[in-house]
Image (cartoon, coloured by chain):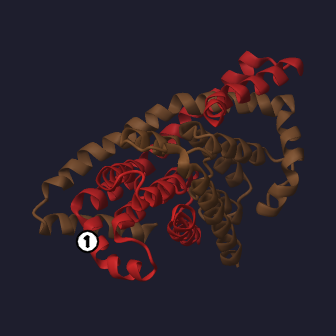
Chain colours: A red, B brown
Amino acid sequence: MMDTISILIIPIMISIILIYGYFKKINLYDTFVEGASEGFKTSINIMPYLITIFIAIGMMRKSGVMELINTIMEKPMLYLGIPPEILPLALMRPISGSGSLGILKDILTNYGPDSFIGRVASTMMGSSETIFYTMAVYYGAIGVKNTRHTILAALLSHLAAIIASVWLCNVFFN
Amino acid sequence: MNKIWFSMVIIGMFVAIINGNANIINEVILQDTQEAVVFAIGLVGLMSVWLGLMNIAQKSGLINKIAQITRPVIKKLFPSVPANHPAITAIIMNMITNAFGAGNSATALGIKAMEELQSLNRNKKTATNAMIMFLVINMSSIQLIPLTVIKLRIDTGSISPTEIILTTIIVTTISTTVGIIACKALEG
């Protein structure tokens, strides 16, 4: 049922906007074009910011830094009750979406999707987002330089997701 | 952002050189930047569609209707945004598309929301409380059905690929709540 809603949500939203506009006697064609002309400008505006952040993310991902951080973080994470097997995913998730998807695939292949590790990893992946990339796109689009407490609040929320995934899977599946 | 970006690049290059992987630096500069360009160009079409639709919704008065209905919740989360401001519609449409996993449409609407919030900003270089709140909620993921994860579980032979939906929704709720509390506490 939810799968169907997921597929239908965009057509539903478009239909509501168009039908409502039609009955309010809006010139749909011209009004759409007028709004759409802004789209090109905005997309091109974010390009330099995307390039800049992609360089930093690429360096972190491909250089071996993540493996290094893994080794350092293993002990403190074990102390928090977080299995070391899911640590690479927990660290990669805020940085790169495609990178963390690759790690999740490895975890599910190696430990099995129905193992404890597999369930925790799946839950964690679905309940968090890429932080640095989203920040670069959204702040880049409007030229904000001073992001204040955005990163700290986002990382706290991410840490909560990690701990809650482990805890909840323990409660649910054990 | 300045310090973080610098550290990520410098440490990355340094480790790559020590590991004898200096060639990945060229690879990153060539390939990853190209990915960024392809993504931005790819966003042009989607961005235009949603901005066109938003324009219709605004002129027809639909935006005011939505703003009225959602006012109680929005007022608590974004107290500095006026009740009938177009930012609210963009935020709500972003959350709906996000919740149902339409990631790229959500990005287009999210950028629109940020632009509207920026129009209320006095200091254009500094993020406002409303922007930070919006981003943190966004980054704690409000997706209802993690379709990519479920697909990956099916591909790796899970007997019950959807059993993680409930845990995912609960964890998302917890992490979003923590994010909102953290924002409110750090606003100062």
Residue A118: name its quadrant. bottom left
Residue at screen point 64% across, 62% down: B176
Residue B79 visible: no
Q: Secondary structure at mark 1?
A: helix
Q: Which amino acid is tagged 1?
A: Leu
* Crowding at mark 1 (Cα within 10 Å: few <14, some 14-19, many 20+): few
Residue B111 drawn above or below residue A164? above
Instruction: Give the quarter of the figure containing the C terminus of chain B.
Output: bottom right
Spot occupied by residue A84 in the image (x, y as percentages of width and height): 35, 71
Residue at screen point 72% across, 27% down: A12
Spot occupied by residue A138 in the image (x, y as percentages of width and height): 56, 51
Q: Nearer the viewer, residue B13 or A76?
A: A76
Q: Nearer the viewer, residue A72 or B145?
A: B145
| Label 1: chain letter | A
Q: Nearer the viewer, residue B81 or A159?
A: A159
Spot occupied by residue A109 in the image (x, y as percentages of width and height): 31, 49
Spot occupied by residue A45 in the image (x, y as percentages of width and height): 50, 43
Residue B52 visible: yes
Tell me the residue that label 1 is attached to: A68
